[in-house]
Image: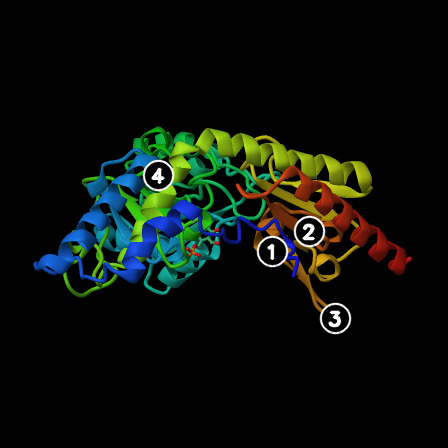
Amino acid sequence: MIKPIYLDYNGTTPHAPEVVAAMRPFLEVEFGNPSSSHWYGITPKQAVESARKQVAGILNCRPQELFFTSGGTESNNHAITGTLRALRARGNHIITSAFEHPAVLEVCRFLEKDGFETTFLPVTADGLVEPAEVEKAIRPTTIMITIMHANNEVGTIQPIAHISRIAKEHRIVLHTDAAQSVGKIPTDVQDLDVDLLSVAGHKVYAPKGIGALYVRPPLKPEKFCHGAGQERGWRAGTENVLEIVGLGKACEVAARDLQRNMVHMQRLRDQLQEGLFAKLSDARLNGHSVKRLPNTLSLSFKRVEANRILEEIGLEVAASAGAACHSDTVEISHVLEAMKVPREWAKGTLRFSVGRMNTAEEIDRAIEIVTRAVKKLRKEKQ
Ligand SMILES: Cc1ncc(COP(=O)(O)O)c(C=O)c1O
């Protein structure tokens, strides 16, 4: 069976071969509990600590400044809920953008039931959060700002270091959801100057269900998951040794190959973008043309519906839709809504996200397949 060309690396990534090799002993032999003081606990404990160093390497932080979680969603929940609860005496206001992943938006909405207040900042037409808007939204009660590093749908990269300067001036904690940026662009917590940063393993060629949260001392978010004292008391629960090892290796490989992968991804992404623009009329790019993840391409095609294109190409190309059209309604993604992409465009939005394993030949084929599908569907509509 020939599998469809995979162009959905922002959705999830395959496991890197080095990740599989690093994990294998922990699947087959090393079953010990890292908290055990006997012989079986020794190798798993060392493996967890060495993975922590590997993740710290890609973030340029100290290993003891991060702990492992079950993924990007948990890291965001812990960062936001834990910080707001810890700093409640100082205020109750959080600033975020209307453009975030649900793993941030829904946390903020949930916390509103607890008396916290949220400002959801608008974004520009190309998806940028303007630092001046952040500054304007600050109140005496603002205790936290959370703005994603890079957007999962359109790839826009936010001016985190600039927002950080504003946060610092006002003594406000800054968190960034870096689920999409780790391994795709530099994610140095010193350069970004953030207090908290979320990592999601399955976007960086590690397994699903593993992540990490960086916390800059002396910040101490309230505990999120209560129980025994694993992860130096930050996060209770026996460690997911297998996947922690996988995340560590994935980060080591991603840091080692970052420059090469950025060039590779951008070359293929641009090939796809140029090819589709050359062959199809009435197409537009969503997101910032330059301040964008090197692998992400969100395109809108007029006079076609995204899910119809995906049905048409589904056996040959795997991509994702920015809008879901039902018989009489169209659900446009909150990201496109926030960027005010006109409905007649938003309806036909596809997100392509390339990755390490893609080749130029695959991109050429994908251009042909998508072009054929869009032309066919437009013809049928006439
Ligand atoms: C920007 C962003 N944040 C958070 C998440 C959630 O991460 P996880 O799937 O590891 O819970 C995702 C996953 O799609 C994401 O793209």
In the picture provided, is 237 more to the left or to the right than 165? Answer: left
Disc 4 versus disc 1: nearer the observer: 4
Q: What colour scheme does the image use? A: rainbow
Marks 3/2: CA–CA distance: 17 Å
Q: Earlier in the sequence, mark 3 or mark 4?
A: 4
Q: Where is mark 4, residue-wise?
A: 252
Mark 2 belongs to which amino acid?
Thr
The answer to the question of whether label 2 and label 1 lie on touching residues, with beta carbons closer than 8 A, is: yes
Residue drawn at the location 48% of the way across and 36% of the way down = 158
Q: Where is mark 2, residue-wise?
A: 349
Expressed as whole percent of the image width and height from the top left, the position of residue 159 reads: 46, 33
Marks 3/1: CA–CA distance: 17 Å
Disc 4 versus disc 2: nearer the observer: 4
Asked if 58 appears above or below 299 in the picture, the reply is: above
Q: Earlier in the sequence, mark 3 or mark 2?
A: 3
Expressed as whole percent of the image width and height from the top left, the position of residue 53 reads: 25, 40
**Crowd tier of the residue under label 2, counting other residues whose Cα lies within 10 Å: few below 14, some 14–19, many 20 or above:** many
Mark 4 belongs to which amino acid?
Glu
Q: Where is mark 1, residue-wise?
A: 333
Marks 3/4: CA–CA distance: 47 Å
**Crowd tier of the residue under label 1, counting other residues whose Cα lies within 10 Å: few below 14, some 14–19, many 20 or above:** some
Q: Which mark, by number, is residue 327? A: 3
State the SS at label 4. helix
Mark 3 belongs to which amino acid?
Ser
